[in-house]
């Protein structure tokens, strides 16, 4: 298959591109900055292109002749607005809509889209609301088109050796005597990046997944505080977790937002922690994924 992977230089993208290349698919990976994905060029069957995927003409060129498009683009931080700021709108709503439109124009039969567990147009955070509207935009574009279809995935928080989740807690544990944490009691169902990739690959080979939305979670539910404590211990720096009131957490996150670079935590991230992030059931059997536990993988890389 000839597959366009948008967001292929990111965390999930690198794992997916490596898997698809090993399966001998022809992969196209667009990137805004060539240097971010230069290492992907060593993979056979991968073509890395520096371009702007937010441009319709570029999307038409990229999707032409493709059998499938996978969209992995997602951001955790963005400017404020109602229902969300322009950063979230551009990445989570307008881009998926443009990709779906390009698929229609170029006759691409499959679009796979990675959203997020908790995506909801009426969600508590800008992240959740924009992700929900992005899903709706895709469905609307494909609604009256019989030549192709979409499949949406909603993973819980994704972990793996190069993630920005478990590794963040491990880094903090090296420097702090305790881990102060707002939202420590919220429940999560972390899913291994290899299982997310396996689900995507399975859907590419199964036309019956078209028009369906799949939740992806691991085999066990944890509180955020439990995850932080385990990651600290597995990194060799066991630390107690101190639960903070959400109000104090928002003050702390506001300070982080004022610092240069990508914030460690934003107020919108905390808004996403107002509800549990767990699946309504096990991973769908047609995806042929047996979920991997956090304990089976994280201790080795932390």
Image: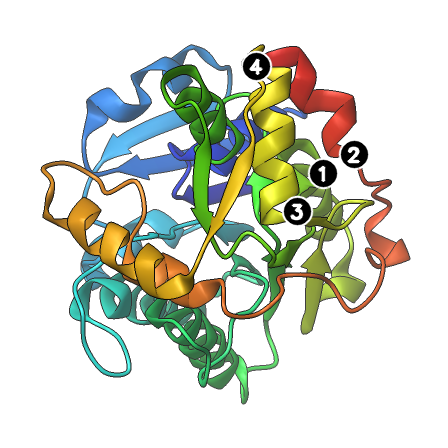
- Tag 4 residue: 235
> At x 59% / y 44%, what residue is drawn?
225
Closer to the observer: label 1 or label 3?
A: 1
* Quarter residue 21 falls in: top right
Which x, y percent locates residue 272?
A: 45, 65
Q: Nearer the viewer, mark 3 or mark 2?
A: 2
Q: Which mark is residue 294?
A: none
Disc 4 residue crowd, few under 14, some 14–19, many 20+, Cα 10 Å: many
CA distance for labels 3 and 4: 30 Å
Q: Residue at x 60, y 14 (%)?
A: 301
Quadrant of the snapshot with the N terminus: top right
Q: Are marks 1 and 3 in contact (CB under 8 Å)?
A: no
Give the mark toward the camera: 3 or 4: 4
Q: Position of residue 96 (x, y in %)?
A: 38, 66
Q: Which of pointers 4 and 1 indicates the residue nearer the eye?
A: 4
Q: Which residue is mark 3?
A: 200
Q: Which residue is mark 2?
A: 293
Mark-to-mark CA distance, 4 and 1 = 23 Å
Within the image, what quadrant is residue 93 found in?
A: bottom left
Q: Which tag, 1 or 3, sits closer to the chain's start? A: 1
Q: Residue furthest bottom?
A: 144
Q: Quadrant of the C terminus?
A: top right
> Mark 4 touching mark 1, by CB under 8 A?
no
> Going by the image, does 246 lie left or right of 24?
left
User: On screen, 297 above or below 52?
Assistant: above
The residue at the far right in this view is: 285
Mark 1 sits on what residue? 195
Check disc 3 and report its element: helix, strand or loop: helix
């Amino acid at each position: 298959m000839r597959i366009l992977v948008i967001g292929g230089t990111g965390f999930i993208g690198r794992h997916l591109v490596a898997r698809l290349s090993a399966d001998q698919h022809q992969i196209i990976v667009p990137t805004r900055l060539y240097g971010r994905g230069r290492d992907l060029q060593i993979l056979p069957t991968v073509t890395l292109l520096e371009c702007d995927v937010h441009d319709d003409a570029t999307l038409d060129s990229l999707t032409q002749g493709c059998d499938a498009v996978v969209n992995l683009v997602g951001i955790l931080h963005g400017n404020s607005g109602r229902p969300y700021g322009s950063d979230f709108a551009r990445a989570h709503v307008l881009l998926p809509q443009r990709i779906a439109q390009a698929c229609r124009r170029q006759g691409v039969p499959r679009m796979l889209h990675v959203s997020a567990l908790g995506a909801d147009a009426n969600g508590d955070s800008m992240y959740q609301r924009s992700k929900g509207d992005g899903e709706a935009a895709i469905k609307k574009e494909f609604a009256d088109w019989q030549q192709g279809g979409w499949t949406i995935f909603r993973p819980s928080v994704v972990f793996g050796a190069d993630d920005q989740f478990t590794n963040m807690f491990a880094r903090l544990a090296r420097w702090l005597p305790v881990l102060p944490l707002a939202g420590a009691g919220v429940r999560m169902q972390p899913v291994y990046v290899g299982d997310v990739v396996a689900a995507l690959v399975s859907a590419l080979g199964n036309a019956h997944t078209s028009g369906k939305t799949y939740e992806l979670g691991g085999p066990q539910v944890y509180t955020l505080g439990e995850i932080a404590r385990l990651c600290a211990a597995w990194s060799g720096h066991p630390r107690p977790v101190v639960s903070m009131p959400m109000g104090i957490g928002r003050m702390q996150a506001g300070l982080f937002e004022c610092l240069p670079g990508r914030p460690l935590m934003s107020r919108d991230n905390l808004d996403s922690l107002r509800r549990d992030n767990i699946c309504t059931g096990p991973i769908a059997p047609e995806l042929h994924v047996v979920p991997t536990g956090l304990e089976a993988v994280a201790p080795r890389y932390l």
